[in-house]
Amino acid sequence: MGLTVNTIKTEVVCQWSANIPSTPPTFTAAGEQLSVVPSFRYLGSILSEDNAIDNEVQNRIKQASAAFGRLRRRVFQNKNLHLRTKVCVYQAICITTLLYSCEAW
């Protein structure tokens, strides 16, 4: 028993501090070349070669907005729910979605 790398699913992002080489390096695992990509999703966050967080922040805003939209009619426009309940739902769902993995930014 051991770790088996799935070379079809494995991707590499190179993050450079300053001088980007003209030809990207190649990476191999289990004798097969891995694909080098400009960005990919890891544990729900977008990692990119330029270390920019703009795409990740925009993605988080989009997801939080979608979560709010799904709850708008049922929760936030419901006149039978107390404001305190609405705030709790907002913090539990929308804010949590927005700030997920923010410690990695």
Image (cartoon, rainbow, N blue to C red):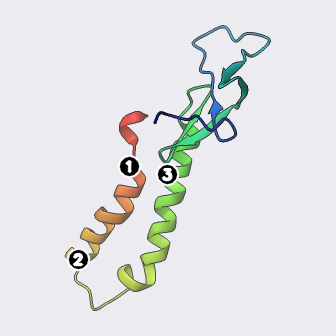
Give whichever of discs 1 and 2 has the lower sequence position: 2
Q: Identify the disc placed on residue 85.
A: 2
Under circle 3, the secondary element is helix
Expressed as whole percent of the image width and height from the top left, the position of residue 32 reads: 72, 26
Against 78, is 58 above or below? above
Apparent side of residue 65 relative to residue 10 in the rendered image (left or right): left
Expressed as whole percent of the image width and height from the top left, the position of residue 69 reads: 49, 73
Task: Say which of 93 and 65 sits in front.
Answer: 93
Quadrant location of the C terminus? top left
Q: Residue at x 35, y 65 (%)?
A: 93
Amino acid marked by disc 1: Leu
Against 49, is 78 above or below? below
Rate crowding at label 1 as few (under 14), some (14 to 19) or many (20 or more) other CA atoms within 10 Å: few
Against 49, is 61 above or below? below
Q: Identify the disc placed on residue 60.
A: 3
Amino acid marked by disc 2: Thr
Say which residue label 1 marks: 99
Q: Residue at x 48, y 75 (%)?
A: 70
